[in-house]
Amino acid sequence: MTQTILLILGIFVLCSFYMFSAISFLKHRLPKKKREYIRIKQLLNGETAGLSKDDEKEVDSIFKSDYDGTDYILPVFFVTLFCVLGFYVLFSGKPSIILSGIWSDEVGKAVSYYRLSLVSISMAILGSYVWSIQYIVRRLITVDLAPNAYYSIGTRIIFATFVSLVLRHFIAFLPEAASNMMINQLPAIAFFTGIFPQRAMDYMQERLRIFNPPSDKAHKLPLEMIEGISMFCKIRLAEIGIDNAQNLALANFKEMILKTPFNPRMILDWIAQAKLYVIVKDGIVELRKAGIRDVFGLITACSEDQLAKLDKLSENIGTDLSLVCADLKERPDIIVLLEIRKKLCAS
């Protein structure tokens, strides 16, 4: 009886983290985000006095629609439910999976295929939970804990769980030596699958050659090619529909300030890099070696009449940079970015 009570109490303590993090954000961190958004809005609009009543109503409406307290109820319940089920499987039973791993009550005797699958699922959930704590704490610090963050965590737990289960079945049919080695390491493999589910997917796709993508397709333009975008940043940008550099190049600057925790100068730098990357694609590496990392750098290089340098770079990357530069100077979106850059540099 005492053991059951401790089990329930332990699961409640672990899973209540999501609920308390949402409350902490709404009560203490959200007002800070609102003040920062108002400051940036005043800066970009060139306002020195306080906001007008209409502007205040607009800001209140934006924050009400994106951070309403009732919107947190369902996603927090969603992710908490999956964690409760996962931790129950992980800690219940004699002996518990977290302590016994792939071995049965009889020391040294391998357990059934069923138990191995259960170990894989449970450890993947534990890995996802550890990742989610880091994820939520970081978003609390950056004042960016919207309701969709909990949906992201819940779907990631589900995704990691099934990927881990498929990986367990996949391992069983590898060559005997490799299979035995990986089965012995299954708890650790499943745990890290919970943290990095996409890497497990990539591993299986690489081994199953029939699922490799065709070579004759458009450039992926991954966000990893944008300097300053880490794994956390990539996950966060994906939540607002930015999955690649093309999406980033077309992103709305003000909307990104509101919906992400990133510094305005950082957002501007990423968009400027993405716009150049979309144009030159693989040539971005050659341009960076020459000190040109974004559209601002290319425009500056053109204005300084570095024609010999641009001609050589154009030959190397197969793109006429002089024509690109002339086009950039006339594009309305680049003109807007230049104006935003000027205001941010003056602040």
Image (spheres, rainbow, N blue to C red):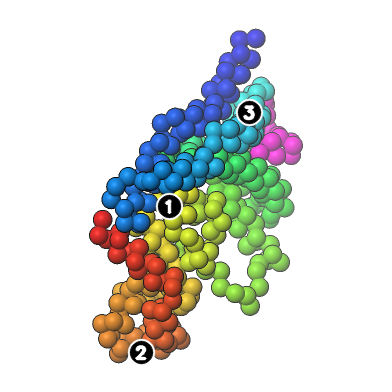
Q: Residue at x 45, y 34 (%)?
A: 25
Q: Position of residue 329 (x, y in %)?
A: 38, 79
Q: Amino acid at mark 1?
A: Ile
Quadrant showing the C terminus? bottom left
Q: For label 1, count other residues whose C-alpha is less than 10 Å away and answer few (under 14), some (14-19) or many (20+).
A: some
Q: Which residue is mark 3?
A: 84
Q: For label 3, count other residues whose C-alpha is less than 10 Å away and answer few (under 14), some (14-19) or many (20+).
A: some
Find the distance from the CA under tag 3 to the CA under tag 1.
35 Å
Q: Amino acid at mark 3?
A: Val
Q: Which residue is mark 2?
A: 311
Q: Residue furthest top?
A: 1
Q: Quadrant of residue 203?
A: bottom right
Q: Position of residue 182 (x, y in %)?
A: 61, 47
Q: Earlier in the sequence, mark 3 or mark 1?
A: 3
Q: Earlier in the sequence, mark 3 or mark 2?
A: 3
Find the distance from the CA under tag 1 to the CA under tag 2.
37 Å
Q: Quadrant of residue 183?
A: top right
Name the mark on residue 257.
Answer: 1
Q: Is residue 168 left or right of residue 260?
A: right
